[in-house]
Image (tube, rainbow, N blue to C red):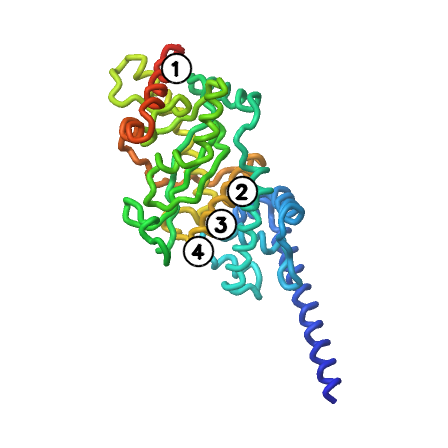
Amino acid sequence: MHSLRLFWSANNEAALQRRQTRLDRRKLDEIVNIPDLEFVHRFRLDKQTFRSLCDDLRHLTSLKGTREISLQLKVLCTLSFLATGSYQRIVGLSQHLVQRTASRCIRQVVDALSHPAIINKWIVFPRSPQQRAQIRLEFQRRFRIPGVVGCIDCTHIALVKPSEDEHLYFNRKGYHSLNVQMVCDSNLKIINVNSKFGGATHDSFIWASSRMESFMRELHQNGEQVWLLGDSGYPQRPWLMTPILNAVPGSVEDTYTQRHVQARDCIERCFGLLKSHWRCLLRHRTLHYHPTVNGNIVLACCVLHNMALEANLPSPPVMEVEDDAQHNNASDSVGAASNQSELLQGRAALSNLLSRLN
């Protein structure tokens, strides 16, 4: 009798799993078969890009599906959360997907999207002189500033109060956040991200501590005359150009600053587009994970942002993004504290750039 009960229990469990798998596949088929525009509206990617993403995650990372939840459904749940910042629509994706399970799926997919193999494919600063030349020429064509290979700034991503090192995340605007440094090109493609610092950290400190700064410095030392554009919260360097404050109207300094502002607006527009697509990053959609997981969520959204750009998908209405700029002039204070020589070299490089404007 006992053996019969065990057999019945195992047989019943197997039947339930088969039924659950059929329900999962049926639900997935229903989602994938919705009209194309609705699919893009709900998940921010088109179906072809979604399938390509699933293939990449399957072959380049350890993300797997289970009998209960397929890999595709995990990815759809994550896309829905990242696009809205809400679990409510996710639960509606599948009758058997409770919020705790949805949260676990999100973490798994976010970890996969922030895997080095995915990051190195989708978020890449131009590695060769030829690639940098293409970006430089595009900036010069659009904004008439030579030598520019990207625009840099930081943006705050709200999170719940961390249980450890809370003071590192409390920003000057009175809430807890990550202060995320990004670099984009003139097409708003994100080419570098640093999401490791809390909201209490100043933009210029993140820059000074970043691999991006070291890389730009190395390019300069190797004789390559290229630079990023940053606001006045950054120190003037030969590889980082900042605006000239209080320039005399009509002067070459004023012309440079106007063009600088127009070109550097690329990074502000990039932030607006990123947060409009992936609304979990908006100020009022506070992330509820550990700061390290939240940093990976930012990386995941940046990967998806670039995928959407490459697929030339229609943009949602761009949200009004809160101004995160730290407007105090760091050029002199940071330069004096760290390296006066580099500050003087930066001013000389800026003077040389002014002579090249036409």
**4 or 3: tag closer to the N-terminus:** 3
**Helix, strand or loop status at disc 2:** helix
Question: Nearer the N terminus, badge 1 or badge 2?
Answer: 2
Looking at the image, tell me whether mark 1 or mark 3 is earlier in sequence order.
3
Q: CA distance from mark 3 to mark 2?
A: 10 Å
Is residue 119 toward the left or the right of residue 327 in the image?
right
Q: Which residue is mark 3?
A: 82
Q: Amino acid at mark 1?
A: Leu
Judge the density around disc 2: few (<14), some (14-19), many (≥20) Cα neighbours within 10 Å: many
Residue 2, relative to residue 275: is it above or below?
below
Left or right, 134 with reference to 338: right
Q: Given the image, on which type of amino acid does mark 3 rest?
A: Leu
Which part of the image, by quadrant, shows the N terminus? bottom right
Residue at image location 35% in from the left, 37% down from the top: 205
Q: Position of residue 354 (x, y in %)?
A: 36, 13
Residue at 37 percent across and 56 percent down: it is: 164
Up-down: is 337 above or below 244?
below
Which residue position is annotated with label 2?
304
Task: Give the number of the mark in front: 1 or 3.
Answer: 1
Describe the element under mark 1 as helix, strand or loop.
helix
Report whether 56 appears left or right of 213.
Answer: right
Q: Residue at x 43, y 55 (%)?
A: 290
Query: Which residue carries the number 1 mark?
Result: 353
Residue type at numbered disc 2: Leu
Identify the mark at residue 289; answer none if there is no mark: 4
Report, in whole angstroms, how far the alpha carbon at label 1 lies from the one at label 2: 35 Å
